[in-house]
Amino acid sequence: MKKYILILFGVLFLCTNIYSQEKKITIKVRDSNNKPVAGAIILFDNVKQRIWTNSKGIFKTRLKFEPTEISAFHPNIGIKKIKYNGKDRLTIVIKKGNDIDLNNSPINSKIVDARQYSNIYDYLNGKVSGVSITSGNNIFIRGYNSVNGSLSPLLIVNGVEVSKDSFGAINPSEIKSIKVLKGPESSIYGVRGANGVIVVETN
C-alpha cells in the first residue's frame, strides 16, 4: 500500500513540476489610436491559437515552449509581427497602414488558411467582420436589433437558402467567398433578410 502511495505522490509531483514550468503570458493588442483590438487572432511562429483577444484586446495563455515570433492579426486592420523577448507581458500595436486583402493576402498563407478553422463558425469569427457568434453557435450581424424575436440572419449557400444545421456542416476548406449583406444590400431578400444576410459560395 505504501508503495502505491509513494508512486501516486511521485506522479503528482511530476505533474506539478511540469505545470509550474509553463510560462504565463499576457498580450495586449492595440490599434494606432491605442484602443483595444477585440477579436484579434494570435499566432506563435505562424501557428494560430485557439482563442482570440477579448473585448479589452487581451489574450492570455500558458507557454510550454517559447516562440521565436508572435503575430497579431485582425482582418479589418492588418497584421503585426514581433520577435518574442521572453517577457510575460507584451503589447502589440496593429496599424492600419498594413491592411490585408483577405482574398489576395501577401502574408504567409498559414495565417489565413481556412484549414486552420475547425468549423464555419470558427471561420466567421476569425475572418469575417461585422459578425458575432455566441457560445451556442448562434449567428447575428452586429448593428441589428431583434426582428420578430430573432436575431438570426438569412443564410444563403450557392444561391439557396439553407438551415442552420446545413450551414454548420460547411467545411471551411470548401469556402470560396463569404459576403455579409445588411441595409439596402439585404433588401433584395425582402422580409427574410430583415436581420441581414450571409452569402456563402463554395468550391
Image (tube, rainbow, N blue to C red):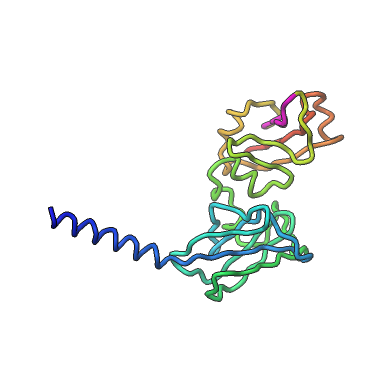
Q: Quadrant of residue 28?
A: bottom right
Quick one: which residue is furthest to the front in this view?
Answer: 2
- Is-magenta flag for residue 141? no
| Residue 169 picture location, percent across and down | 56, 33
Residue 156 on the magenta span: yes
Picture layout, residue 192 above or below residue 134: above
Picture coordinates of residue 101, whole percent (x, y):
73, 55
Q: Is residue 80 left or right of residue 196?
A: left
Residue depicted at x 56% and y 47%? 117
| 185 relative to 128, above or below | above
Magenta stretch bounds: 149-157
Q: Specify the farthest residue to the right.
A: 184
33 sits to left or right of 105 = right
Residue at position x 58%, y 48% in the image: 114
- Image coordinates for residue 198, horizontal then vertical, percent: 72, 35
Taking 168 as reference, is 178 left or right?
A: right
* Residue 29 sits in quarter: bottom right
In the image, farthest residue toward the bottom: 85
**Residue placed at 63% from the left, 49% from the top?**
126
Please give the name of the residue rendered at 29% of the width and 63% of the height, measured from the top-left corner: 14
Q: How many marks?
A: 0
Q: In which quarter of the image is residue 165?
A: top right
Q: In this view, does 157 lie to the left or right of 174?
A: right
Q: Horizontal and vertical percent for residue 168?
A: 58, 34
Q: Which of 150 and 119 is in front in this view?
A: 150
Q: In which quarter of the image is the C terminus?
A: top right
